[in-house]
Amino acid sequence: MIGYTTLGVKDIDASKKFYSELFGAKVLFDGGRIAMIGNSMAEPMVAVCVPYNEEAPTPGNGVMVAFPGGSKEGAAALYNKAIELGATCDGEPGQRIENQFYGGYVKDPDGNKLCFFDFS
């Protein structure tokens, strides 16, 4: 259902590298100030962009993008990889919501909040 989610960034090249390495994906479209990163244009992607109005990118309060890990181990591995790539911890991986949801939270180098999760 979701085609892509866009995250505002300061450094487009650094952000393309961060997300490509984090997900083992590639830049599928590069329009200069915006790039789509994923495995296929037919699958959900993450887009990084320098804001059109040329003002500083600011993460929304309460806005978060969640990426499935496929398992608890997969969610933790994505969390750890994000930290290795320069993200900061915003909640270590762990069981949440009465043992029905496992998640780890980071903020990417631009402050965008990400969750890596598994429903289990």
Image (cartoon, rainbow, N blue to C red):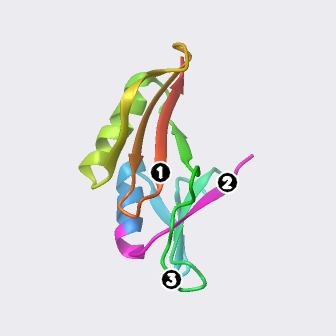
Look at mark 2 in the image and give the residue it sits on. 42
Indicate the amino acid at tag 1: Lys
Closer to the observer: label 3 or label 1? 1
Indicate the amino acid at tag 2: Ala
How far apart are labels 3 and 1 at the CA level?
A: 23 Å
Q: Residues within 10 Å of mark 3 (few under 14, many from 20)?
A: few
Q: Please indicate whether residue 19 sits to the left or right of residue 81 in the image.
A: right
Q: Residue furthest front?
A: 61
Secondary-structure class at tag 1: strand
Q: What is the x, y in percent for residue 19?
A: 41, 57
Choose top left, top right, bottom left or bottom right for residue 78.
top left
Look at mark 3 in the image and give the residue it sits on. 32
Residue 12 colored in magenta in the image:
yes
Secondary-structure class at tag 2: loop
Residue range in magenta is 1-14
Residue 65 colored in magenta in the image:
no
Q: What is the x, y in percent for residue 93?
A: 37, 29
Image quadrant in which the C terminus is located = top right
Q: Answer with mark 2 or mark 3, whichever residue precedes in sequence.
A: 3
Q: Residue furthest left?
A: 84
Q: How many marks?
A: 3
Residue 115 appears in the figure: yes
- Callout 2–callout 3 Cβ contact below 8 Å: no
Look at mark 1 in the image and give the residue it sits on. 113
Q: Answer with mark 3 or mark 1, whichever residue precedes in sequence.
A: 3
Residue drawn where x is 60% and y is 85% of the image: 53
